[in-house]
C-alpha cells in the first residue's frame, strides 16, 4: 500500500513540476511580447540611436533607396532582446535623417 501511495505522490509531483514549467515559459513569452510591442511603439518617429541604445548594435545593416537604412537585430546576438526559446528578429527602417519610420518584430 505504501508503494502505491509513494508512486502516486511521485507522479503527482512530476505533473505539478511540468505544469509549473509550462506556466513559467508562457509567462516569459507574454512578458517578452508586451516588452517588444511597447518598445516598437515607442521607437517609431525617434532617432535610430535610441534603438541602438535599447537593443545594442544591429546584427545586419542594409542601405536602401533614398537614404533609407534597414537595421536587423537577432536574438541571442542582440543583448537588448529578452531571452526566448525561439528566434526573435527585430527590424527597423529609418529614413535619410536617421528617424525610425517602421519598427517591427517577429518570432520564429
Image (cartoon, helix red, strand yellow):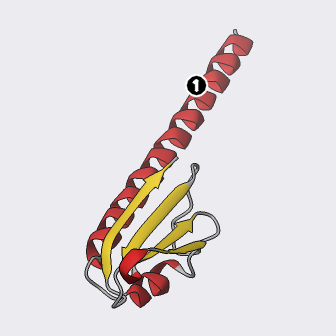
* Quadrant into which the N terminus falls: top right
Q: Depth check: 89 or 6 in front?
A: 89
Question: Residue 44: which quarter of the image?
Answer: bottom left
Measured as percent of width and height from the top left, residue 25 is found at 51, 47
Measured as percent of width and height from the top left, residue 78 is found at 59, 72
Against 78, residue 48 (above or below) is below
- Label total for image: 1
Q: Residue at x 58, y 37 (%)?
A: 17
Q: Residue at x 58, y 75 (%)?
A: 79
Q: Depth check: 57 or 7 in front?
A: 57
Q: Residue at x 49, y 48 (%)?
A: 24
Measured as percent of width and height from the top left, residue 92 is found at 41, 71
Q: Residue at x 63, y 22 (%)?
A: 11
Q: Residue furthest top?
A: 1
Relative to residue 58, is residue 37 drawn left or right? left
Question: Residue 50: which quarter of the image?
Answer: bottom left
Q: Depth check: 25 or 60 in front?
A: 60
Relative to residue 47, is residue 15 drawn left or right? right
Against 23, residue 43 (above or below) is below
Measured as percent of width and height from the top left, residue 83 is found at 56, 61
Packing grade of label 1 (10 A; few <14, some 14-19, many >=20) is few
Against 21, residue 68 (above or below) is below
Q: Which residue is mark 1?
A: 12
Against 97, residue 65 (above or below) is above
Q: Residue furthest right?
A: 3
Report helix, strand or loop for mark 1: helix
Amino acid at each position: 500500500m505504501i508503494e502505491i501511495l509513494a508512486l502516486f505522490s511521485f507522479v503527482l509531483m512530476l505533473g505539478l513540476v511540468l505544469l509549473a514549467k509550462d506556466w513559467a515559459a508562457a509567462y516569459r513569452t507574454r512578458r517578452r511580447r508586451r516588452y517588444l510591442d511597447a518598445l516598437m511603439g515607442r521607437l517609431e518617429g525617434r532617432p535610430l540611436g535610441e534603438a541602438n541604445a535599447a537593443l545594442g548594435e544591429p546584427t545586419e545593416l542594409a542601405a536602401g533607396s533614398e537614404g533609407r537604412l534597414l537595421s536587423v537585430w537577432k536574438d541571442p546576438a542582440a543583448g537588448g532582446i529578452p531571452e526566448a526559446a525561439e528566434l526573435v528578429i527585430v527590424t527597423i527602417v529609418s529614413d535619410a535623417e536617421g528617424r525610425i519610420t517602421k519598427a517591427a518584430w517577429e518570432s520564429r
